[in-house]
Amino acid sequence: MNLRSLLHFPVALLCCASYGLSLPQDSPAADTPYTVLNARFVTGNLARFPVQIVQDRLVVTCDVSTAARRLPANLFIDFESPSTLELHNKAAQGLKSERENGSTIPITVHLPGLEFQVERRQIGDDEYLDHFTKWHSIELGEVAVIGTLGGALLADFHVTFDLAAGEVILEPRAQLDPEGVTPTFATDTTALDINIKDGMVWMPVSLGEGNSAMSGAMALGSGRYDSTLDSDVASQLGHHAGDVGLVALADFNLGDYLALRPAEVPFVHPDGALGVTGLGFLEHFRVEVDRTNRRLLITPTKPSSFPDADLAYFQATWDAWGPREDAEALEAFLMAYPEERLSAEAATALLETRLIQGAQEDAVQKALEWASATSPEDLRATAALEWMESCSAFGFPEYLVLAGELGIKSGRDDRYPNAVHELHAKVGETQLELGQGTAAWKHLLAAAFGIPEDGRVNLGLGRYYESQAEELAAAGDTDRALGRYRRAFSRFVQASIKADSGPAAIEALARVQKRMASAGSDQASFSVDLVERMIAGKVRNFGAATKFKATDENTGTKVVLVEFFTNAFYGTEERGGAIGGALAQEGLMQHFSDEHVAFLSYHLPVPALDPMTNDLAIVRAEELGITDPNVQVIDAVDGQPGAGKWRQAEAIYDRTRKAILARLTSDASDEFELDLTVEYLAPDEENPQGSVSGWVALDGPEYLDMHVHCVLAERGVLFPGASGVVVHRMVARAELLTEHSGDQHGALWEPDAGSMEVTFDVGLHTVQANNEACLDRLMDEGAGTVRKLSMELDPRQLVVVAFVRDDSTGEVLQAVVVEPDGLEELRKQSE
Amino acid sequence: MFVPEFTLYYRVAPQERSRSEQVVGTFHIPEIPPVKKQTQSSFLLAAATLIATSAFAVPAKDTSAPTQVDLTFRTLRTWDVHLPAEAFAPIGKTIPFAAAGEAGLKVAIEEGTLRIDRNGDGTLDGRVETPSEDKKSQLVVFRLNEGTEDESSYAIRVQNKGRWSYAPAGAMEGRAGNTRFMIFDQNGNGRFDDYGVDAMIVGRGKTASFLSNSIHIDGELHQLTMSADGQTAQLAAFSGEMGKLDLGKQLSTKAKMRSVIVNSEDGKHSFELSRALTAEGGLNVPTGNYILHSAQVVLGKSHATMSTGNSKPISVDAGGTSTLSWGGPVNAKFRYRRGGDELQIAPGDILYYGSAGEVYSNFMPLGSSPKFAVKEKATGKVLVNAVFPGNC
């Protein structure tokens, strides 16, 4: 018997003990899959490993491994965390530590001097870990932080924090003190009785003096630099900023060493959870944690030196009502303490507060300068990107330009070389919108040198050239105007293949092409084919190595129907999604001719609406029981994958090709004759975009329950969604028999002497209107929003696919593909 | 660390296994001794703004005329508020805000970005890119009557998860006596007078109840009437009957209750009780039946949420004190599906019930799984052991 969990279910479990809803204990139960296994000290009975403080976090460099792989890693050490080993999902994938059925491969943590295993990891905060690594990559030795060693793991050891020596020492848990023997310690070491609650180490502490003194407990922590004080307690004591004076811990007054930071303390303790100590405490004291004997050995390692700057910051940001946003107080703090540990935090707060206030330019400029001055020199350009985002979101494009220009000054020194190009791009884009054309052009051009394929940069440059062309055209300088239009057209083409700029670029291409034509250009008209030629080599593609060669053995009368369900926003080019299926389809269309295989693609409204979604797609998906845009269906009886990474396209192609080959010899169509005749009619008053007219005829057995479908499709539709697919193939646009049937289900087989013929005459503008109405309805129903691009059908791309469906089984019995008459001439005219 | 174990007893009849299986899907966590509550006077003070000072629950006297409190909008730069029913509302062409009139605040979606008219001048001057995954949402601030004496602001958080949507990023803030209160337009309709739907924070702290007709001002219960635009609140001494609600007395937990929301059955009253849990005697509330709506349980960076589940309404009678036994011990129940020779159990199929029938869910961080054992009913022999994968 197999016991299988559902892999993708979003809800997770954590043992109840973590929430105090279960057994109390002071060390992990031995039989859980999260605790330390097979701990082995490499030499002797002690592991002494170097640690460093990076941006207020304690970090150890080590390796993690499974039987499959070994990775260098940095891990946070969070002594107060109830978790065990937290790991980034990507790290767990790299280690191959988890199988689909829920079973795991134990993960080994290789600390200097100590190795141990954990059967299962817990999930880390992936986004935070990624951001931390990006910002501190140099301090981290270019090795990512991939997780956290939590307190629940460290509880198995005798732990010593000796940050003055830059190390943490792990030893086996101590033995109980012999009865009747009083332990002795070094003269400068103080022993403090502690208690253990929920696996955490709690130290008795008293705050303040005299009648207002308060006693309680503080947890020993290493997860942040600041030692925290419950903000409610601080408020009760009348010291909102945490400046409670005496903080008595054993014989020490921590108030001489630390400024306590008001914060929520997310723990409870019977004596009162006053706070959690941080790395600032451990920087001043060597702390040895003897859980067995419930004892802490504390040795001062650094003379007391009260951090006035820390207190000043807490005073600037807290008042009787809680946290406060006071720009003047923040600015005063920065003036007094421009280069302290909390200065960068203060500068960020100052900038955001100024923006919230809607401050004037000089105040924002000053705040930006503080933000820049307090950022690491080699991250100022990178940081400026974040400031620009804030300025933009708050509705101050002019401040965005200020922030960008400030960042550009530090661009050469930035550790991320692309940051300066991105700054140029954003500044240029914004200046263009502000009507500062020439300045914008300079920035956009500078950006284009570094990030030439960036969609927004090309879109911006295109718009700039287009505006120049219009000025020249207005001035009667047609030749130069055409030159600018050509430049604009070229930039728009490059922008059209990127998701973030594609929709706007497509509109611009159509617009510019018309203006070029009216300016006397005799160049080819805008079409999917033209764009496809221009973007060749810049987008993913997949070509079939061979063409299908039909023989009597591998074919019969059957034409196979392959229906591809997809969506322009399903996945991304990098991560995979619709791109894998779409590339495989390209290969299949090259391999098989229309004589043998008919292709149709339907765009579903998930995960986001795309403009090719229509009623036909939704109904056909319902008929086939399909909900996700990731499948190819062959003759309605065989499903093949329709999504994956681009590099998986060949595998999808191979599988689908084989499945099609198996169907080509089906005798399902032997009793049928399906004929289709279609003609394209040029635009007239009634049909301003033209129309398709014709008939579909079927001969077959009268006793069968069947429907005949006749689907109008386009061979290529240009729409760059997020999926990386730019040109969508064989897009089903309309069921042509709806006038006959009244719905999207095709025409019911109602034979007369074994034959049936259904005629149709459908205006392309009607198809567009119906599809737009469908999008409107879906948007009203809450399916999201979408720009109605690529909605107009290009007659040169039209094709009609008819097929016969057996109502009892759903199987597609026969199909046929026909290009409407009249398109050849149309294409020639537009070339 | 304790990891719950599930046992599925499986009676095997060699020839007819599929029909004779019998599965028992409950497990029990041993009872936890109740944790001694903090009784230090110092900790009682923390809840001072919430706790009625009267020694006995008696009907309050209407001794004072209603007073009006003016409120102004406060933007919260960093969002660490816990709303009882936070939901991001889809963004259309405007953001409703009663103080801005019927037209609301103009926004648009262009080229995938959200454009905002920051100051109501008709120009879309703000551009919000889709917030990064680590940022999740972006603060957006609108300014009304810019440059005039009546200048004010309004703020929302926006996100784009396939569709742009918004939620409050601030509240109308007012002060009465020594009590500060904040009213949140939780449902995003632009109004601040949707009782039982919008949200409010009374006193210090970051956890909100639903907007209530009654509010504790300096420990005394008052009737609260909000204006639709949120700019004024009318406060009058509460004149109805009151009783005490003490949810701390019989709560069994070793974690911190970051928030505890109770709602009156009629939807008029709502209270956030986390700071009152340690108070002796409970909190004065209007009489009636109260439902344990939700709670957030935290321990360090781990947290879980609680919802009503099967818990019964709590009746608060005039002059009486009502308590509820809730929290641990926790029982878990789960469903499973059988397909061929496979049993499927999904994390979401497991419900953790507290002693009052309340349900705990959304445990974070992820990755800790219960252990499942499938046993033969007759012999007790373990057929299969399993756990969930580490990514769920």
Image: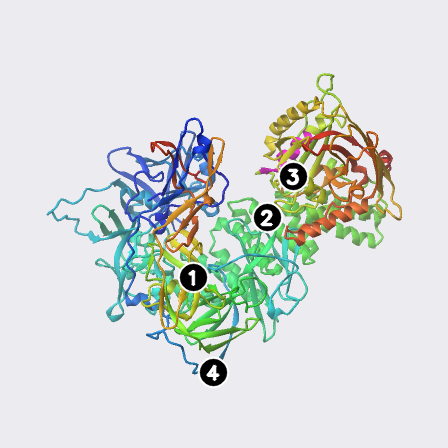
Callout 3: chain: A
Callout 4: chain: B
Which amino acid is tagged 3?
Thr
Mark 4 lies on residue: B65
Mark 2 lies on residue: A422
Residue at mark 1 to residue at mark 2: CA–CA distance: 57 Å
Q: Main secondary structure of the magenta part?
A: helix
Residue at mark 3 to residue at mark 1: CA–CA distance: 48 Å
Q: Secondary structure at mark 3?
A: strand
Q: Which residues are magenta?
A: A576-587
Q: Secondary structure at mark 1?
A: loop
Residue A246, percent across and down? 27, 64
Which amino acid is tagged 1?
Pro
Horizontal placement of A343 versus A655: left or right? left
Instruction: Check if mark 1's residue and mark 4's residue have beta carbons within 8 Å.
Output: no
Give the number of the mark in front: 4 or 2. Answer: 4
**Residues packed near mark 4 inside 10 Å, few (<14), some (14 to 19) or many (20 plus):** few
Residue A599, percent across and down? 72, 32
Instruction: Check if mark 3's residue and mark 1's residue have beta carbons within 8 Å.
Output: no
Mark 1 lies on residue: B313
**Residues packed near mark 1 inside 10 Å, few (<14), some (14 to 19) or many (20 plus):** some
